[in-house]
Amino acid sequence: MDDIEFRYDTQLLIEGHDLDEDKINDYITKNFVGDCLLAVGDDELIKLHYHTNEPWKVLEYCRTLGEIYDIVIEDMDRQARGLQG
């Protein structure tokens, strides 16, 4: 089985004011290691999806932007091993 490079599938919603999906994408790309980044929405609500090994750092950053909720962090390595058995 191939090892998963980025273990945690991190998903959440950010609710705030003057949110900018491009700035959020740029900040995460420059400051956190991961892949499959998706940050889409408008200036009041952003949906974020990111594969990383350090989801808590992403949560800390997103909390500085506004209220975060509907947080889902899935361990893709566990899921993959579960499907093998």
Image (spheres, grey):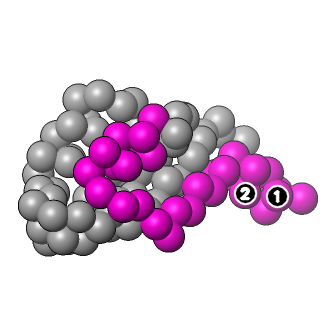
Q: Residue at x 54, y 35 (%)?
A: 53
Q: Residue furthest right?
A: 85
Q: Residue at x 41, y 61 (%)?
A: 68
Q: Secondary structure at mark 2?
A: helix
Percent coordinates x, y for residue 40 in the rendering: 22, 66
Residue contact between numbered discs 1 and 2, judged by CB atoms under 8 Å: yes
Percent coordinates x, y for residue 19 in the rendering: 15, 59
Q: Does 61 sit above or below residue 17? A: above
Q: Residue beneath label 1, please?
A: 82
Percent coordinates x, y for residue 10 in the rendering: 49, 54
Instruction: Report if residue 81 is visible in the image.
Output: yes
Observer-nearest of 40 and 42: 42
- Of the 4 image quadrants, the one containing the C terminus is bottom right
Q: In the rendered structure, does residue 68 fall within the stretch colored magenta?
A: yes
Q: Does 13 sit above or below residue 21? A: below
Asked if residue 76 lies left or right of residue 69, the reply is right
Q: Amino acid at mark 1?
A: Gly
Q: In the rendered structure, does residue 76 fall within the stretch colored magenta?
A: yes
Q: Residue beneath label 2, please?
A: 79
Q: Residue at x 56, y 62 (%)?
A: 72
Instruction: Name the quadrant containing residue 13.
Output: bottom left
Instruction: Name the quadrant containing residue 3.
Output: top right
Percent coordinates x, y for residue 25 in the rendering: 20, 47
- Of the 4 image quadrants, the one containing the N terminus is top right
- Point out the stretch of residues depicted in magenta: 57-85
Asked if residue 41 lies left or right of residue 84, the reply is left
Q: Few, some or many C-alpha atoms within 10 Å of disc 2 (few <14, some 14-19, many ≥20)? A: few
Observer-nearest of 50 and 18: 18
Q: Which mark is drawn over residue 28? A: none
